[in-house]
Image (cartoon, rainbow, N blue to C red):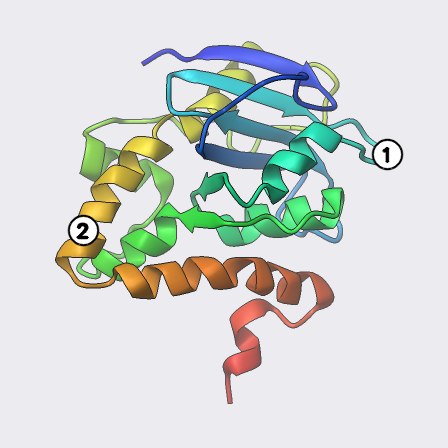
Amino acid sequence: MTPTIHLHASDLPEGLDLGPVVAIDTEAMGLNPHRDRLCLVQLSSGDGTCHLVQIPQGPVKAPRLAALLEDKNVLKLFHFARFDVAILQHNLGVRCAPVYCTKIASKLTRTFIDRQGLKDLCRDLLGVDISKTQQSSDWGQKTLTPEQQLYAATDVLHLHALKEKLDALLAREGRVALARACFDFLPTCAELDIVGFEGLALFSH
């Protein structure tokens, strides 16, 4: 599936409605929310269209994107939400909720397998092979290449379909309520990461 890609500077366009469930991903200069700046936010309503918001260097002001992330009537759908929620909170000053994490849902249901990456889930559950060749590219450059844009869009293109498959597995295994409790904790887990408690390490001995 080749997505339709819309690239926006600094914020979402006015009047854009992405529906009640929005797939979201981020690209940054690295994996440390304190050190590495947010460069790109990808969003899709699951219809094959992806909106890429390029975040400029310096003070970040994206009021329409921030309002969507904080909208309690919109479910934000991630893969490995812990990082994305943390870097969005740290850079945009928002508490992103409610959220759903396909990685957590997979770990709660597919306990027979160690590989829980997005590429693995797409292959195993959807029969789709996605490329991760641009994963380590420079997301801070002013002009993103077509290859980077396609890679970024692909990261949100399949999340709605994955959620449908994983919801069925959660129901089958009797872990729907447990998954919801984990998802509800994710914004707090991200906040713990940001202030230096490294999330679940707080609960260790």
- The residue type indicated by label 1 comes to Gly
How far across and down, in percent of the image, does residue 43 sit? 52, 27
Q: Is residue 13 above or below residue 198?
A: above
The residue positioned 38% from the left and 16% from the top of the image is: 48
- The residue type indicated by label 2 comes to Leu
Quarter containing the N terminus: top left
Q: Which mark is residue 169?
A: 2
Quarter location, residue 37: top right
Quarter location, residue 9: top right
Q: Is residue 121 left or right of residue 64?
A: left
Q: Which mark is residue 58?
A: 1
How far across and down, in percent of the image, does residue 62 sit? 75, 30
Q: Which mark is residue 35?
A: none
For the residue pair 154 and 92, the one nearer the viewer reads as: 92
Q: Is residue 194 above or below residue 87?
A: below
How far across and down, in percent of the image, does residue 20 sit? 44, 33
Secondary structure beneath label 1 = loop
Instruction: Tell me whether the residue at label 2 lies in contact with that at label 1, contact meaning CB atoms closer than 8 angstroms.
Output: no
The residue positioned 52% from the left and 54% from the top of the image is: 82
Q: Is residue 138 visible?
A: yes
